[in-house]
Amino acid sequence: MSEANIEGNTGAPTPVGQEPHHFRRVMVSWIVISVVGIVIWLLLAPLILPQGASNLDTADDFTMVVFTVLAIPVAAFVFVFLGYSLIFFRTKDRPTEDAVPLKPRPGIQIGWLGITGVLCLFLFIWGMIAYYQETSAAPNANTLIVRVTAQQWYWSFDFPQYGTSSQSQVIELPVNRPVQFIVTSEDVLHGFAIRAMGVRVDANPGEMTTTPVVTPTVLGNYTVNCVELCGLLHSYMWESVNVVDQSSFNSWITSQGGHP
Amino acid sequence: MSQEAIAANTAEVGRPTLRQQMFPSVISGVVVGAIGAAVLSIIVNAVTQGANQDATVAALYVGWVFFFFAGIGAYNDVLKWGFARREPTHAEEMDLAGKGRGLWRYFRWTTDHKVVGMQYLATALFLFFVGSMGAFMIRLEQSRPGAVFFPPSTYNTIVGMHGIIMIVASVIMISGPFGNFVVPIMIGARDMAFPRLNALSYWLLFVDIPIIITTLFLGGFQTGWTGYAPLAVQELTPGMMAYCFFIIIFAISTTVGAMNIITTVLVLRTRGMTFGRLPIMVWGVIFSVLLSLAAFPFFMLSQIMVVMDRIFQTSFFEGAYGGNNWVYQHLFWFFGHPEVYVILLPALAIAAEVAAVFARKGIFGRRMMIGSLATISILSAIVWGHHLYFSGSNNPLDAPFMLDTELISIPTGVFFLAIIGTVWRGRIWVTVPMLFVIGLLINFVVGGITGIYLADLPTDEILHGGMFVTAHFHYTLVGTAVFGFFAGVYFWFPKMVGKRLNPFLGQLHFWLFMVGFNGTFLSLFYAGLIGEPRWSANVAPPFAVPNTIASLFAILIAASVFVMVYNVIITLRSGETAVANEWGGKTLEWMVPTPVPLENFVGELPVVTSTPYDYGTPEPHPSDVEGRLEEDLRLQPQTLPQAQAEG
């Protein structure tokens, strides 16, 4: 965050007098705290973030880990400077004299702008590349198409390739087969989201919206949520998604009246 | 108007009678307003034969507003001076400003900016109290899985009312009380540029509060504070109309107030108060009201369209009849995102103002900080599309919106550089306002950084519409802006009221609030990370633990609210009297006596010769140009002849 300041100080003669070398001390604590923070985050991240159940979700979680690694030194910089100032530059009572004004030198300003600008560009470019990679896959013949229709206050799922629709509050998806959801709404705005699979798009009345092609990778039971407030029973608008192996999927789709 | 009547008016001196006190005042306003509302709604109900409830409710609100203003005497000026074609005399202006009215001036159509500022402060605190009660009901409901305490319809109404009341409260909380009370004194003015409009902007807010309360008797509204159409149009009860009219009236109030503040700062600065010497607080308020001037008309427009959809079936937003719900979302967020910065910018300005006073040190890079606030306000107007990343509508614009949004982190970083440079090597006096500024900075780091995840497409894909968003905007709006508001309250309360708030209770308020707030919303970040959607009356079992923890921490916030209320009450009853310059500040409001006299400055207006931050030596040290930070810090301290800071 402030390499400019560090550079300005290397090779400086040690100041005379009792005054401790505040700036060096705070920079060292910043580096130490940042490193410790990053290590702790990398250890904790697998516990905090839920297991990614699809290729999209795994990628999204990875982006989150990377951004947090970058965020820790930024946050630590403010916390360390603020905390240090409060401990060492605090007066016990109403101060009787003024402090010495500091003026920013162009070097600090330009360095600061440069570093935040580079960080910002990194976030943007990373985000664009990551999102492009996630969304660029086009559906092909193997892709399972699921039509999702939202209504106050439930979801219905059609499987046009199998000529049937889900007869209950549960749908099943085959593992490792790409799937694309085509989403619409019958009445008001709803939000279609499966957190564990990293898919999310609004269900708009009179419009078709699609999610990226997503491949479930982990067997398990997940939840479809409505994430746009859609009226009275919005918070009851859940449904289950079971990711199962191909043969279970085939028998399930047959049991729903579809041709396998 | 006859000559005798003019003479009678101008000669009006001495103690007014009880009848003169009461009529016109807020009491006659409420009485006349209620009668007007009843009459108008009965007429419309009869005309529509009771078939259009929304039209009846609209008539109720229109009648209430217009007749309230008749009752409080808002039109009297037009009759007295407008039709008489003469300017009011100075004595008449002073009478209108509440001269000799005692405490009753707070309940009348009073034009004095200090009265309006106090009215705004009391209203903001009242709205925060009401809104926080809604928050505690939300935490109560979410403390257990399943809809246990409230049925979903009640819960949705509570969430919507909490949201919109808090948004309104936080839009006015700084530009209202401090923008009206403190800013004119800071720039050396005797009053606002348009004193009557000032009264109008406050009383519009006042009439607005009963309107949102009436939703409780009209079946509530299910849309939350965003009021998304077509749900808002589909809504079967007329409670939605309360929301729409609340917004429409509030937008007028904000626009009138914003225009007034801008004009005041443009034309009423005293001699020597150049733009280069304006205190940072004035800049913060100016950027905020400029943004609200640009943003609020869109909110008002969108609500007028919803009202028309409801009353006249115009179907602006109904897909089935050729409308489009994305239009509403764009209109709403075109207002909605700048609105966040309307709330945030003056809070950041308060942080800088307070930090400079309590570090006894000029703001580090003052121009740089003003530039950062200006850049934030410009950028914030072009980022609204990030609310629609996953609406399915505007894919080609996702990238530019993402870039704009992330660019805001650059001026925000500059703000942090400036504020760290201000406290660095200061002589930091940790008072209650300073504590709140420290809390603000810590929370703003968390709120700002979590904003990055929501601005970036791949991470927003798993977080959008979830509790993570809720936690993020509470960190920026409550953790940052409301903390800034409380810093301002503790900072300027002695000047505005003339009494000292109890510092021990102030510290208790801060610590309860800070710990409770962080506990609550850090757990909600976690709930959002594992996928909890927003607005759930019915918390799903996987999210039960973080929600219960959040609710437990919210008890601390509730306690802090009551500590604050208690502190204000005992201070008003028996607080210590404050001195004119309570903290050793250098802006003009600390140079006038406490309580501030009518027209603020006794005798001539002051002439300003320097910036209000000339703590320490004003000369730049040679090492400012070259050399190092450490050295110029070490060389200078003994050269200071300063003692003038103390008041």
Image (tube, grey):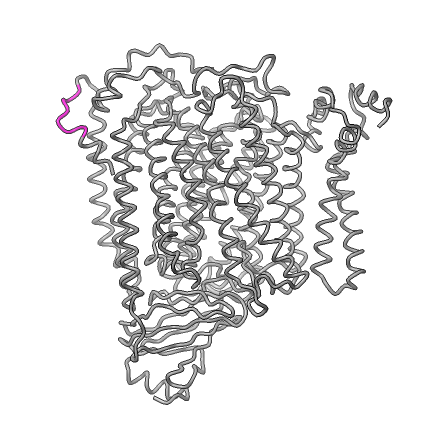
Q: Residue B585 appears at what percent x and percent y?
A: 45, 21
- Quadrant containing the N terminus of chain B in the rendered view: top right
Per the rendered image, the range of residues in magenta is A8-15
Position of residue B634 in the picture relative to residue B640 (left or right): left
Rendered residue at 43%/77% (across/down): A157
Position of residue B269 in the picture relative to residue A31 (left or right): right
B23 to A213, vertically: above or below: above
Pick whichever, B623 or B119, lies toward us.
B623
Pick whichever, A62 or B255, lies toward us.
B255
Does the magenta portion include A13? yes
- Total numbered badges shown on the rendered structure: 0
Position of residue B258 in the picture relative to residue B93 (left or right): left
Q: Residue B578 appears at what percent x and percent y?
A: 54, 21
Does the magenta portion include B139? no
Rendered residue at 55%/59% (across/down): B223
Pick whichever, B628 or B572, lies toward us.
B628
A163 to B545, vertically: above or below: below
Q: Residue B17 appears at what percent x and percent y?
A: 81, 26
B605 to B46, vertically: above or below: above
Which quadrant of the view contains residue A245? bottom left
Q: Can the viewer see residue B588 in this picture?
A: yes
B401 to B181, vertically: above or below: below
Which quadrant of the view contains residue A19? top left
Q: Residue B228 appears at what percent x and percent y?
A: 54, 59
Q: Can the viewer see residue B151 in this picture?
A: no
Position of residue B111 in the picture relative to residue B579 (left or right): right
Rendered residue at 37%/23% (across/down): B362
Name the chief secondary structure element in magenta. Answer: loop
